[in-house]
Image: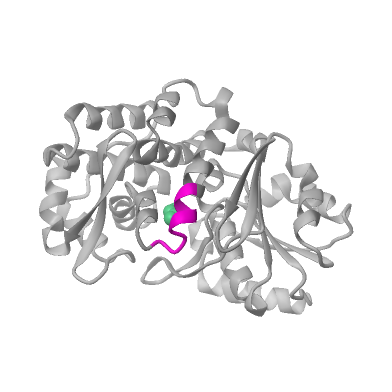
Amino acid sequence: MITVSICASKHYDVCIQRGLLPQAGEYIRNVAGGMTAAIVTDDTVDALYGEVLRESLQAQGYRVVKFVIPHGESSKNAANYIALLNYLAEQSVTRTDCIVALGGGVPGDLAGFTAATYLRGVSFVQIPTTLLAMVDSSVGGKTAIDLDAGKNLAGAFYQPDLVLCDTDVLQSLPADVFADGCAEVIKYGIILDEELFDRLKQPIYPQLEQVIARCVQIKRDVVMQDERDLGLRQLLNFGHTIGHAVEANSNFAVSHGSAVAIGMCIAANIAAAQNLCSQECAQDIYDMVRAYGLPTNTNYTAEQLSAAAQKDKKRSGDSIHLILPSKIGRCEIHKTPVAQLQDIMEVGLS
Ligand code: GLY
């Protein structure tokens, strides 16, 4: 097993190993006392893995209750958040009990925000079942729900007590959902680790545990320096500001990973056009994104993308931070006036 220890406002381990799910109860028992474990999952994941997790928790003496949401981003809403809080109260879940998120980013974010606020905070374990959740959303403590005005607009920084990544479960992922996670993996290589980027030129499956661990280590190193996203952590948003604009324009029909892939390519174009990186660097980014079956461009116009990007929650006043590559393994944060955003997008799309 590979274990990555994270020491942020909470100290916790991210454990990565094939076949971990049936042993989840034992690992959870080591970090969370209490009588009750409340599983939060979606209907797709529940059908595949809900019973395995329940049995594993019951074997450790937990009373198990379960809250199942329909799969998909639209479930990460305020109504489900309130319903989950009420469910936990009805089930007499107490301060010493724990919430276990089983699934991708949607159950993870909803469960995490609920764990942060129910009784002012209860123990929280993440069992991510997508590559994207393993390398990004389950680690680092960002939790949120979506509001009508946008994605992740209400949330909290709330670190989990444990993250369990069973890579066997990735075998049940549809190819496009797996590729979504690959976009985040590629991102880590571009922003901070050329060696990881080079490693991704080889098939990913035989090195999955190592690649996930490397991504988690990179995120750990960033989060431990800037847990509350005030500086360095913004690097993790490479491809995301433009990606969120693509997602928003598509009304979330374009998946997060595909949108980030497009965002990374547009950002690479911008950087190359401004001589911040070489043409070869931008081409390497394109080639890698394409090699993982991800899209590299969009039909949305610069006007549409900049209008959506201006609503990004990371906008501060009249400027927005764009993350642009200077070479593979190094990116920089560029404070960009929103008034210039459309022109810059135009450059990125050309
Ligand atoms: N997903 C970006 C971050 O955790 O900061």
| Identity of the residue drawn at 58% across and 57% down | 108
Query: Relative to 153, does residue 14 appear above or below in the rendering?
Result: above
Indicate the quadrant containing the C terminus: top left, top right, bottom left or bottom right: top left
Q: Position of residue 185 (x, y in %)?
A: 45, 38
Choose between 127 and 33: the one closer to the eye. Answer: 33
Q: Position of residue 220 (x, y in %)?
A: 51, 49
Viewer can see residue 17: yes
Query: Relative to 58, does residue 2 appear above or below in the rendering?
Result: above
Residues shaded magenta: 221-229
**Among all residues in the image, which is located at the extreme top?**
202
Image position of 322 (left or right of 247): left
| Identity of the residue drawn at 24% across and 44% down | 267
Indicate the quadrant containing the N terminus: top left, top right, bottom left or bottom right: top right
Q: How is the image coloured?
A: one colour
The picture quadrant where one finds residue 330 is top left
| Identity of the residue drawn at 39% across and 50% down | 236
| Identity of the residue drawn at 41% across and 22% down | 201
Query: Relative to 289, does residue 243 appear above or below in the rendering?
Result: below
Choose between 252 and 154: the one closer to the eye. Answer: 154
Query: Relative to 182, does residue 252 appear above or below in the rendering?
Result: below
Image position of 104 (left or right of 249): right
Q: Position of residue 147 (x, y in %)?
A: 43, 71
Viewer can see residue 174: no
Q: How many marks?
A: 0
Image quadrant of ligand 1 equals bottom left
Choose between 103 and 274: the one closer to the eye. Answer: 274
The picture quadrant where one finds residue 96 is bottom right
Q: Position of residue 197 (x, y in %)?
A: 40, 30
37 magenta-colored: no
